[in-house]
Amino acid sequence: MESSDETNGAAALDTLRTAARDPRGYVGRWRAEHPGRKVLGVLPMNFPRELAHAAGVLPVIVADDQQPVTEGRAFLPEFYCGFTRNLADQAATGRFDLYDGLFVADHCIQLLGATDIVRELEPRAPVFLGQLISSLNDISAGAKIAEMVATLRTEVESFAGRTITDDALRASIRSFNRDRALMRRVFDARAAGDTCFSPVELQDVVASAQAMDPDEHHRLLSAVVAAREPRPRDDRIRVHLSGHLCHAPRRELLEVIEEAGAVVVDDDLWTGRRYLQAMVDESTPPLEAIGRWYAERNVAVPCPTRVQHDVDWDRWLLDAAERSGAEAVVHLMPKFCEPHMLYYPELRRALDTAGLPQLLVETEHEGIPLESFRTRLEALVERTHRNRPAYA
Amino acid sequence: MTVTMPTTTTTPDRSRRLAVTREGGRMIAEYWDELFTARERGKQIVWYNGGALNPIFQAAGLAWCHGEAFAARLAAQQLEGPAQLAGAEYGYNAELCSYSRTHLGCAVLTLQGDEGGSTGVVGMHDQAELASRLPRPDFFVNNYAGCSTGQQWDEISYRVFDKEVPIFNISHPFLWGNKPDAGYLAGEEWESASRYVRDQLVDLIAWLEERSGNRFDWDLLRESMTYIKRAAELRREGLELCKAKPAPATFWDWISCVAPINFLPGDQRLVDYFQAVKDEIQDRIDRGISGVENERYRMYFDGIMNWNKLGFLSRKFAEHGVAVLAGRYIQNAFWQEPQLIDTDDPLLGMAQHYLLCPTNHGTKTLDYLTLRDCAEYDVDGIVFHSTRTCRAFTGPQRLLARSAQNNLGIPSIFFEGDVADASFYKEEILESRLTAMLEAIDVKRAQAS
């Protein structure tokens, strides 16, 4: 018989899972509970949601909703990534009515292509690009970041029809930090050996955080965490998942990785550690702190969409593998993701040099060849087994 | 990976390409030969991407290699294979921008062939292959506007060379058009972005002076920009002349003029060249000679150039009596607004041209430019080159096609190809879709008469 904590934990996880997989349902409930308040769609990966939250807006990171692309095909070429084609499809089929506006802070040419489709097809919704400088070694980077964060604050105020006070912003920063810190505790525990959460469960936890109010998410996640007992690792092959920079990999792919005889011990996925690793400094003035958060995110988990000469995704990956004991790396590369394609040879070279087995899996929005992946993953597991000492 | 098959044609060539572009070809060939031997002449070499920084490098006493230009040249000569193979073996995905893939492949070849590093001419063992003759860089400069891949491409070049080559990056705001006052060459967004990029050019010049040890020659910059401005004016005047019916020259002639305006030194020879281009066009008008034999249709071409197929496409469209007259890659790129250049103080105007890269606008501005040019050249339809590995150019194309149909009643077709990878080109798709569009135009004309 389940204890009350377990029951509450299971119910809380179910609520998170539902919000992750059906943000429309969550937004509908939120709107009903907050009449007159707006919902802002924000595109990954770097828009500071705290600004919108402090203005009384619900900032929802627009997710790939895993629906097949139908009418959206008419608006973007087939060689745009699945996420952006899905965004175009959301706009083309009216699914973007979920949001009252759309803000984007990143310069990804595919993302901007999809954003222009939204601007064209959803003229009722304001669409704002507040481009955060992506070259972080530029002489003017600090000043440009500060300038853009201030602009974003003004634009969000205009969207919300409400001034953002420093006190409100501090409170929002605390809320998001608290939620990130709890998620990070879970991820750190996994890296240290706790397997009580499956990769799909953790993806639901993070994806729901990307859609929900942070206080509500924190309350539910606290119940989930309280109900879970740590579970030690067994001797399955320990795998680090790398990639999928701005949307979630298909859940069935995560499942098949573990079915192949591996256990996921860490990741740098967007719906994983990439989202939660960097915190906003609560001890500095809030707008300045948000600027620093952005500037330092690339240090927390290096991103191939940023340019920073002294920060290396490959070095970070090797360090992460050492911390978690990962024995192999699976690169999850969404088809047509050019930043990932450019950096992949550097990652491959570093892992090869370190003797870490790796597998590149190129993912697609729909129709992924799962059984082919299963065979290749099983081969990776076998290959990695041979790396283990005979008498460990 | 590129597989370039010879293209055979059984029909006579009905294109009448400008004779003067052969001189442009000679100038370009000389330029590259000079670059390959620049190190032997004591020159430091900069690899750069994006907007035309060559006047700054000229005034800084450097030799320069434009990454896209070199990739395009290899593709135009159908010599891109070795570089792309080297890139593929290194791990670059075939769906990656083929400019960057070719250029990074050259970087890999440069490193692999570095036994000849003391001479600066790489790949001594394999000099027959143009791809391996690129001298290794002393500096990288990134000047990419619009396409987000550009910044990463140079950052990766920096990493391929083990972070041993100094790199400078210029950041460009995307001209998105947030505010009601935003427009082409107008609004606060345009003004602030212009100033921001100009300030970075000042920083770049100081950076180059410090690292090269060369004093920057401001007079030489003013002088070269004076020549470039004049060449750009002549180019625009020549483009204006092509509005005539029948058109005296075509888009393909202007494609042949891209390299000279985009990266050759600013000097009298450049001005003379564009004067000769304009003169030949004027002469054709005077003598009633058209760029396509028996022009029947006028087309706009949207898409970055398919460099493997330049000659082939010019013949193909001419074969159908189609004069391709204008396109985003010609009318809206390459010093296309010479009036912005103040030759006494050229940096602001240069910065503005870098921002005017035809992939650095939101669709609202592109829509304005496309409709304007389609109307001014009185075109019957648009051919969209769905450039497989160029997400920057292809992103807005479907919206542009829709707008042209809705606002001007102009039909369009899409065909598949790529900038520098011939394997993506699909001949039968272009042939069948082009034929269908021309038939539809004929039907429309018959109904109207």
Image (cartoon, coloured by chain):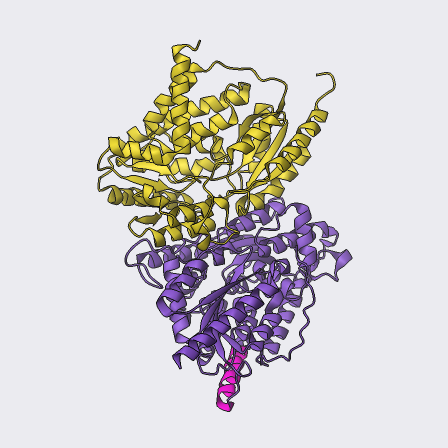
- Chain rendered yellow: A
Which residue is nearer to you in this view: A51 or B32? Answer: A51
The image quarter containing residue A379 is top right
Return the x and y of residue B84 as percentages of the image width and height: 66, 54
Quarter occupied by the N terminus of chain A = top left
Which residue is nearer to you in this view: B127 or B181? Answer: B181
- Which residue is farthest right? B125
The number of callouts visible is 0
Does the image show residue A108? no
Q: Is residue B277 magenta?
A: yes
Q: Check the image and report above or below for B268 versus A249.
A: below
Return the x and y of residue A129 as percentages of the image width and height: 36, 49
Q: Check the image and report above or below for A342 versus A374.
A: below
Return the x and y of residue B163 as percentages of the image width and height: 60, 44
Q: Check the image and report above or below for A380 versus A148.
A: above
Kindly identify the residue that appears in the image at 42 percent across and 39 percent down. A63
Chain B: drawing colour: purple
Q: Which residues are magenta?
A: B272-287
Magenta stretch: dominant secondary structure: helix
Does the image show residue B113? yes
Q: Is residue A211 magenta?
A: no
- Which residue is farthest bottom? B287
Kindly identify the residue that appears in the image at 52 percent across and 69 percent down. B436
Kindly identify the residue that appears in the image at 47 percent across and 26 percent down. A202
Quarter occupied by the C terminus of chain A = top right
Which residue is nearer to you in this view: B32 or B400? Answer: B400
Q: Check the image and report above or below for B276 versus A117.
A: below
Q: Is residue B216 left or right of residue A46?
A: right
Q: Is residue A331 left or right of residue B227?
A: right
